Image: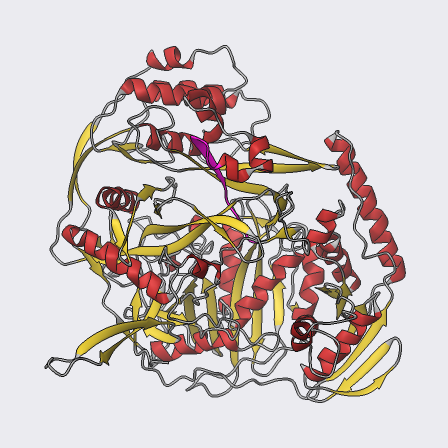
Amino acid sequence: MPAYRAVQATVLTFTPHVSWPVTGYRTTCPPRMLTLLENAWQTRPSRRPRRGADHLPTSALRDLLTLIDPAITCVHWDPRDPAWLRARTLVDSDLLLTAISAWASTRVAPHLPGTDWYDLLKGADQFEWVSEDLDLAQHDLHANGTANPAAHVFTLLPSLIAEHLTTTGVSLLGHQRALRLGPARADGHRSLHLGEPEILTGQDGAAGASVDVVTFRLKTAPGVPKAHLHVELGMTRFAAHPVDYIPRRGSGDPTISVLLSAREGLIHRCERPMLLHSRITVRRRGEEHLWAWQPGVAEILARLTHHQPPSLDELRTAPGTAAARPFAAHLIHSTGMTYRYPGNDDAPAARATHDHPAGSGYQPRDHMEVLTQLAHRLEEKGLTPLTPRAKARTRAKTLLPMKLPDAPVYEIEVWASSERTWQGLQIAAAAKLNLTPSGSTATSATFTGPISLTLRRCDPRDLTAGLPRCNDPDPLARRAAYEASETDRTNKITNAFPRLAAPIACVIEMEGAAYFSRTRQRDPKPLFKKVLPALRRNVQCLRPIAAATPHPSKAALAKRFPGTDFTTTDIERAASALHDALRQAGHLPKPATPAGINGPFELITVWLAPAGERKVVPIAIRQHTHDEPTAQLMPTAYNQAEHPMPLTALPEALVAGRGRISTHASHAALAEFITSALALDSTTDRLLLVRRARMSAHEIWPWLQDSRITFDHLVLPGIDMTDPATAPLVRTPGDQPGLRIVRLREHEDDCAVPRAFGVTEEVAATAESTDEPARTTRYGRFSGLVEVGERVFWGINPRSDQNQTPLSLTKLDPTASANRTWTCSNPAPLEIVPAFLQDGDNPADWAMYVHAQRRLHTHTTIATAWPAIIHLAELMKEYIQ
């Protein structure tokens, strides 16, 4: 493997002094027209009120307007905005009125079916277009040195670049790709589909379609004077066979995303060839699955298009056929979905369902191929790839010492009905946890070694069975039946397993979600995670270990765990369950002391865990070098006194509903809670790790935003930084001795952190007649810390042992379609910004310390997306109902 000493990010930037002038027009929604629409919307029955000035459901209108006329470049979410619509040329008012009237009759006022919206809106004010000249390549700087593009550039630039590329095309690995413009998005990101979806059939008969997708995003970083255009390569997978299982996300009904397209235009022949997103809700009623379009652009197009709209029955029973219609509907695959084999004699008899055959992810060379080719097409616009960055120089260690408790004693309760699962857990404890068995009976097993562990077996009887489903068509009756069945099961669990004196971990043998869906039962896991912590049992589930095959093949024997008739996979699953149970029992390493710190040290985080619509649970966790970790919830009207508690007691507090607040109504109280975590009156060396997402929104802590961070000049949470007449109080390291603050931003935070890969040049062998040796550039996975700004670093995790995909493989070659079955994993960077340090601190050392925390775990050998303390806080979401 080559040693990568530099990193190339999938980012384009404008060269200095380049210009990209754009001449266009903008307009706002006429006031009288807007008043008519809002008045009708206010009278709609069962409308859910929302906060903010704009109550209209404009997302479907945005999709529709960007579709009907190629001249419309972007649509703002707020019709009152002076630049609600932006277009390259003047847009036909008749076309706009047709679209808006269809949206009004479908989404705004379906309860007024007799209203002639076209005539009503035509009699209101007319659209007034204002010409404007823009330069997308030039921008100012914020006071802290961060790039400051105009607000409209974040939406306009990605769209114009995507449109520009559809006219020029692109060649990847020598194969020309026909590009298709992706759906418009409210956040301004824009995507390109690199061709049409192609069907892939695996060796076992599994079938599915997939297409390569490139997404453009314009982002900034604190103190970096150039705006970054991120070029993200991804894949969208589609169903080719009927869906067998749809995972449910959250507490509502399962949903499926659908991509809509038409080769000849959806409304008329002149609109741009563009893709649209829609969604389907799947309601399970007894033995039936009822599919229904969610409110959006799909129901509007059904009134406007000259094509036959997609059939939900066809999408459900034959998604491959629905994808081939003139008005095509592609069912988008999501993780966890499974599909039924077609009903014919050629279908494999060994299994009834299959997963999607296309594996997710790409190789580094694929990402760089896309970046190189797109940069070549955009060179005329002044865009070039970001200069490769060198590895950061730091004295901090990549691996921190693991300081574990001395001779700890743990007890784990095991709810196992099958003898085989009980045996598998004992084998895993001895072989994978490096423990020595010291005694075993039918109901207990003890182990000694670095820790003392006792497994106590309990018989759950029928408590782990699925909950019954109700077929009553009345929703109130179904809700009452579900509540009654949950109350009955809760009483049975409470009677069989009374509340304990102290929290312990509990491993429960239970079937997976797909099993309960297949047997038409409700999954009891959410109920167990709500009930058992109140009985002081922190829950860890384990699917049953299957019985051994009576006459195994040679291939099956090769997969067995040495010296047993268990498969290696089953023992690994059992070991994982034990590791996670020990984590929940409090088996955690103490935080390592950073270099240069003498004496006690404290690691702190405040995590805002989502708890339903517009609600969060703020969780403060503290890890000490000399004490046990503690957690604290925010005081509320129902619990006005919240004190620090052992981390093992946090699940019990969460299932009781404590600490839950509304993000809109509790800004001041939330800011005060975060400020208390800073311990402003303390002089102890301490480090606060804080995630940018959610925390800097809604003015909770504006100082964390890219444009407002001034390094080592702290402005406390809750202080308004937008009022020019009021200068906020700034605190320096001398005012707050011992305090450090590091802001973190992950790749999933609107993909604000680019992908990055190792790059190196190698000398290739050449013919003797050639004087100059040929140089070739190689790309691969990189791990470590990269400095990208004065105080901005990317921390990249090493590749996990499970990922063994060869670097020579590529998924972009259409002649090697079998390569698309591989799953490729490239650890995403974590953006680390040491925003507030003490005098004499080295920012790179503290960034490396934070990055190394991502591997400081006892329950997993895989580096996590977050540092250990934040990872522990994030895991608590399973106890927030």
Residue 814 x %, y %: 37, 55
Which quadrant of the figure has residue 7?
bottom left
Query: Would residue 90 be found to the left or right of residue 206 on screen?
Result: left
Residue 633 in magenta stretch: no
Query: Which secondary structure dominates the residues rendered in magenta?
Result: loop
Front-most of residues 619 and 246: 246
Count of numbered circles in the view: 0
Residue 750 vs 593, above or below: the answer is above
Does the image show residue 859? yes
Residue depicted at 36% across the width and 58% down the height: 812
Front-most of residues 206 and 150: 206
Query: Would residue 379 be found to the left or right of residue 518 on screen?
Result: left
Q: How is the image coloured?
A: secondary structure
Front-most of residues 274 and 326: 326
Residue 497 x %, y %: 86, 63
Front-most of residues 132 and 756: 756
Residue 328 in magenta stretch: yes
Does the image show residue 142? no
Residue depicted at 67% across the width and 70% down the height: 573
Which stretch is magenta? 323-335
Residue 536 vs 718, above or below: the answer is below
Which quadrant of the figure has residue 512?
bottom right
Residue 858 x %, y %: 60, 78
Picture quarter with the N terminus: bottom left
Residue depicted at 83% across the width and 64% down the height: 499
- Going by the picture, which residue comes out furthest to the front? 345
Residue 513 x %, y %: 69, 53
